[in-house]
Image (cartoon, coloured by chain):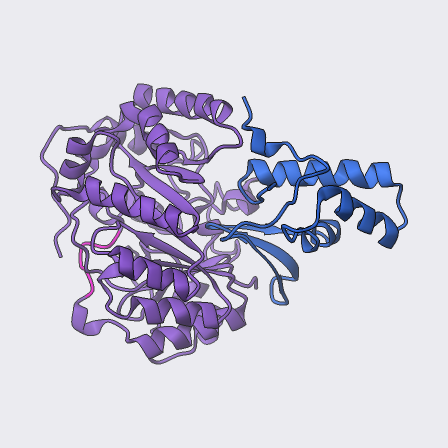
Chain colours: A purple, B blue
Amino acid sequence: MSAPLGLLAELTHRCPLGCPYCSNPLALDKRGDELDTATWARVFREAAALGVLQVHLSGGEPAARRDLVEIVKAARDAGLYSNLITSAVGLTPQNLAALSDVGLDHVQISIQDSDEASADHIAGYEGASARKRALAKEVVNLGLPLTVNMVVHRANIGRIEPMVELALALGASRVEIAHVQYYGWALKNRAALMPTREQVDEAVRQVELLRAKHQGRIVIDAVVPDYYARFPKPCVGGWGRRSLNVTPGGRVLPCHAAEVIPDLEFWNVREHSLADIWRSSPAFQAFRGTDWMQEPCRSCSRRDQDFGGCRCQAFLLTGDARAADPVCHLSPHHPIVAELAADRKDAAYAYRTY
Amino acid sequence: MNGPATQASDISRPRLPRGVRLTHNEAQGGWVLLAPERVFKADAITVEILKRCTGEATLAAIVDDLAATFAAPRERIHADVVTLLNGLAEKKLLDLG
């Protein structure tokens, strides 16, 4: 059994924005159920003891936590490398400086579009874009590394170049071009978000040109869209292999979407140690290794490379969590994916509401 | 077109920037380089080079020290160091200074 590398710590599901592509579940955790500071500190110590190297402090909006500085200090004290995954909205320059002082390692700011009006529309928050750009400057002024995360979908996929140029102008050392994946609120809004194949091919071409153009100045990480792929992504690096996700209420998930799969038993950090959960919880054991696989995955030469793709996506699209991720062209259910990708509507977004 | 900062020279004073940490981890089986949302395994040679990248020592001095410590030709060490540091700088994992 491998040791996990990363911990996704969803500190809260509260968030001022309403992004329609949010991967949080539709049923968001209530504020009253959130783990307190001391519990997060314990989780971080247990994670470090398990071998976890990095914690991704996320949510919702992690800056909505009044104890964020204590939480980041606790991550540092536990020896974890800390990434703050933030919308920047609700994070003041003063708080950012305090986070820097307690040893925060890296800040990732989401930017919804290079076009400010479009960006605010996507986020469902007027003025969001201006706040993000302002805080990005503060991050760089403090000497912290900055990543700009850009979630890409039909509304902004034509602006890959201006989006990368914006990331450069803001002083980011890294930009993530993250094509939407369809879970949670993104799944609900799929028809409004889904790009065409032509748009995706052009976006891939743009990324390659930009990588060559800006080599050495900025790192461009790109997550390709599933629905137009031939093979599936190695989701979370394999179930229960590389990472774990702790929800605001303390449930530990092998991935952020796992609660869509029925009959999985998730354990809570309030009742079990993280090591115990990693090793023995039924949810983590459910799809570990390859014994659970059906054909075509079971005898496929790629099974240790992509692990059969995404369990949650297999369940959502085929009704069977043990099926091959139908994104794979070898899946008998693969035709579903093209049908769903063709189902595009310029409907209004169903904004994420807390 | 590369930016000028990705060309290591003898007078470079390389150092790991803020947000890049070289650390040893038992559970993960050795030395790792931690960077924004990325982890890289660091082999023994990489570790010896990066330990000397303090921002004070010049690349030439680092190569001298490695040559004195390990039995390998200085030219070979120099080439390996330049290749490693340029590669890391391109990935924004190192400041060439």
Residue in front for this viewpoint, A210 or A23: A210
Residue in front for this viewpoint, B90 or A33: B90
At which x and y percent is residue A44? Answer: 43, 71
Which quarter of the rendered picture does the C terminus of chain A lie within?
bottom left
Classified by dominant secondary structure, the portion drawn in magenta counts as loop
Residue at the (44%, 24%) spot, across then down? A210
Q: Mark yes or no: residue A269 visible.
A: no
Q: Is residue B62 above or below residue A276?
A: above
Residue at the (37%, 30%) spot, across then down? A164
Which residues lie in the magenta part?
A24-29
Residue in front for this viewpoint, A313 or A244: A244
Please indicate whether residue A194 sits to the left or right of residue A273 in the image: left
At which x and y percent is residue A12? Answer: 25, 63
At which x and y percent is residue A222? Answer: 42, 35
Q: Quadrant of residue A169?
A: top left
At which x and y percent is residue A101? Answer: 40, 64
Q: Is residue A258 above or below residue A166?
A: below
Please indicate whether residue A73 sits to the left or right of residue A163 in the image: right
Which quarter of the rendered picture does the N terminus of chain A lie within?
bottom right
> Residue pushed farthest left?
A348
Q: Looking at the image, how many numbered discs can be counted on the residues?
A: 0
Q: Is residue A173 above or below residue A86?
A: above
Residue A25 within the magenta-colored segment of the rendering: yes
Residue A327 within the magenta-colored segment of the rendering: no
Q: Quadrant of residue B48?
A: bottom right
Please indicate whether residue A190 sits to the left or right of residue B56 in the image: left
Q: Mark yes or no: residue A106 visible.
A: yes
